[in-house]
Image: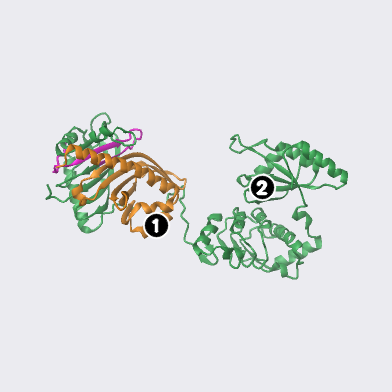
């Protein structure tokens, strides 16, 4: 059972990684789209509004075809994923929500979850193992 | 070439010129960023502010800059006064400067065709016109016996051709200008006005050296373009870069050099169409599907009671966060980590928001993370009752390993008691589940 002190450290680390990661991710998505796949693991999966995209190559193609975006993140939260679930690989679940405009068209609300995993060689680098993105357009549909 | 910004030096120069006795010299007027403005609006605005009526000759665009020629010195002076007086269409305080410089006689005036030549040109063009396809074949027009072939007359030929087109073939769809030794597309920029219906343009085997020449064609809604055999094709080694560059100039293009282009990604304002349409729940393999559905079933039963207590493990962590109250249909997300058991449910929670964007205190951040089973059950019981619309659920299974299953559920629910009774809210739950048997 995790002691309260350890837990606090976990949470701190997770929070810091998540915040930094999120700001980099959305900025890259909006302004340097071609560099976005560098934030994903080789075998990462993306479920985008129900469409599955697996592997770096498919991800690159997918992001190329996605129109230019303008993201605004209104909510961000995260928690460390318990080590037992991930076989001691430090993992953080990041949840974001906000609005996005594609190609200057109508605004959509979106929800996105990332599973971030720490790659420690040579420095600690967080990469996306899995990504789930969905529009939240309940009002209009 | 000297550029004048205000009247006095210009007048001085004028004085000198007229002393020489040169009649009506030509002046070039330059409007930086002229490409931003609609040509008719620009000319009308200038005319409105100018005390003397004038006729702009050869209005054309050089990259972003708009230029036109004016003949009389007095007109030139009057026009100079217009500089910085015209306001941007959106009435921002951006004034449009106008610069003047002395110039040579503009092309179209210099190389006007004589009337006899004009008629001959008309006949030649009529011969080359195909009515059924609304296509005009001007291939190798320069070497056609009907036209004089000299470097000077080529430019005037272009202008004259356009005039004929405007007069005789107002609904021209296809224009073939291949093998015509055109170095630039300046003369063609008038096509946008004279033959606005052109959708198919063949510019192959000419002498075009740079892709931005094509930006002059932007006003046309071109669907098909032929560019083979131009030096510009050789400067861009990579086929896809070439296609992309052309597409940047002409985004609506469908066919290039005879090949269909993959349809451009456009998002229509009326009917939002994304690259991939939004699909319903993605549930992965059948096994997973049944697992997830099982979890949700538990959910269902739990949710319909006042306070749910599904089975949970020792180190369950629950995070209840952001709730947007501004919108009628709010969004909330809650995340749960379950250890040692299968799921549990979540309800809306109004007070303890843990939106990291707003909450910077690290201590509070830890506090609000509901940790361990007891705390969670307590929190859940305290949450207001809700009524979920199960038919609205959309589930995405997005990650799974032997040890872990992650999926998200979105849907809507209604708060059936408390301050926001009757309010419909949307939610997203993200679950990370472990197989039972771990403790």
Name the subunit of mark 1.
Answer: A
Q: Quick one: B17 or A14, which is closer to the camera? A: A14
Q: Quick one: B53 or A95, which is closer to the camera? A: A95
Query: Where is residue B127 shown, x and y percent of the image?
Result: 70, 68
Asked if residue A58 shows in the view, the reply is: yes
Q: Which residues are magenta?
A: B306-334
- Would you say B421 lies left or right of B47 here? left
List the single residue furthest toward the top. B419
Q: Residue at x 84, y 44 (%)?
A: B17
Query: Where is residue B262 shown, x and y percent of the image?
Result: 47, 61
Query: Where is residue B434 shown, x and y percent of the image?
Result: 18, 49
Q: Residue at x 14, y 36 (%)?
A: B374
The image quarter containing residue B290 is bottom left
The image quarter containing residue B276 is bottom left
- Disc 1, disc 2: CB below 8 Å? no
Q: Residue at x 67, y 36 (%)?
A: B84
Count all numbered tags in the image, as a single digit.
Answer: 2
Please identify which colour was used for chain A in the image: orange
Q: Quick one: B321 or B158, which is closer to the camera? A: B321
- Would you say B275 lies left or right of B231 here? left
Q: Which chain is green?
A: B
Q: Which residue is mark 2?
A: B66
Query: What SS does tag 1 mark?
Result: helix
The image quarter containing residue A8 is top left
Q: Which residue is mark 1?
A: A60
Q: Is residue B86 above or below residue B125?
A: above
């Amino acid at each position: 059972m995790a002691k309260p002190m350890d837990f606090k450290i976990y949470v701190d680390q997770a929070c810091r990684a998540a915040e930094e990661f999120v700001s980099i991710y959305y900025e890259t998505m909006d302004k340097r789209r071609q560099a976005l796949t560098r934030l994903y693991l080789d075998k990462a999966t993306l479920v985008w509004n129900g469409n599955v995209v697996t592997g770096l190559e498919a991800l690159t193609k997918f992001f190329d075809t996605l129109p230019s975006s303008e993201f605004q993140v209104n909510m961000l939260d995260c928690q460390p994923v318990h080590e037992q679930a991930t076989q001691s690989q430090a993992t953080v679940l990041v949840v974001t929500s906000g609005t996005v405009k594609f190609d200057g068209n109508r605004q959509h609300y979106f929800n996105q979850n990332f599973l971030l995993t720490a790659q420690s060689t040579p420095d600690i680098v967080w990469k996306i193992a899995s990504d789930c993105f969905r529009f939240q357009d309940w009002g209009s549909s | 070439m000297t550029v004048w910004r205000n009247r006095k030096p210009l007048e001085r120069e004028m004085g000198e010129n007229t002393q020489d006795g040169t009649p009506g010299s030509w002046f070039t007027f330059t409007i930086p960023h002229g490409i931003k403005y609609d040509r008719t609006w620009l000319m009308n605005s200038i005319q409105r502010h100018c005390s003397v009526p004038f006729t702009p000759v050869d209005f054309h665009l050089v990259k972003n800059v708009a230029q036109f020629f004016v003949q009389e010195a007095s007109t030139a002076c009057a026009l100079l006064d217009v500089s910085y007086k015209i306001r941007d269409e959106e009435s921002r305080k951006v004034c449009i400067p106008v610069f003047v410089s002395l110039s040579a006689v503009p092309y179209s005036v210099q190389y006007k065709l004589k009337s006899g030549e004009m008629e001959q040109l008309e006949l030649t063009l009529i011969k080359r016109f195909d009515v059924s396809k609304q296509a005009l074949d001007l291939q190798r027009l320069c070497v056609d016996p009907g036209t004089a072939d000299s470097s000077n007359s080529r430019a005037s030929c272009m202008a004259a051709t356009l005039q004929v087109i405007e007069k005789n073939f107002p609904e021209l769809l296809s224009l073939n200008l291949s093998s015509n030794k055109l170095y630039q597309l300046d003369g063609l920029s008038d096509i946008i006005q004279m033959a606005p219906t052109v959708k198919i343009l063949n510019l192959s085997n000419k002498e075009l050296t740079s892709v931005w020449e094509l930006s002059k064609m932007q006003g046309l809604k071109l669907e098909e373009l032929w560019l083979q055999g131009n030096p510009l094709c050789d400067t861009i080694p990579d086929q896809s870069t070439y296609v992309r560059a052309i597409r940047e100039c002409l985004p609506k293009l469908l066919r290039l050099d005879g090949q269909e282009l993959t349809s451009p990604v456009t998002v229509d304002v009326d009917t939002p169409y994304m690259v991939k349409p939004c699909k319903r729940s993605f549930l992965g393999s059948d096994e997973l599907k049944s697992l997830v559905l099982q979890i949700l079933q538990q959910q269902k039963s739990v949710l319909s009671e006042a306070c749910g207590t599904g089975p949970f493990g020792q180190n369950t962590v629950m995070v209840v966060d952001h709730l947007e109250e501004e919108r009628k249909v709010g969004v909330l997300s809650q995340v749960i980590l379950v250890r040692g058991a299968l799921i549990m449910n979540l309800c809306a929670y109004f007070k303890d928001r843990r939106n990291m964007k707003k909450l910077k205190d690290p201590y509070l951040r830890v506090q609000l993370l509901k940790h361990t089973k007891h705390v969670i059950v307590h929190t859940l019981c305290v949450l207001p009752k809700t009524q979920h619309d199960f038919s609205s659920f959309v589930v995405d299974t997005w990650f799974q390993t032997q040890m872990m299953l992650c999926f998200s559920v979105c849907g809507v629910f209604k708060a059936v008691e408390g301050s926001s009774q009757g309010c419909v809210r949307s939610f997203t739950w993200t679950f990370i589940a472990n197989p039972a048997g771990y403790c």
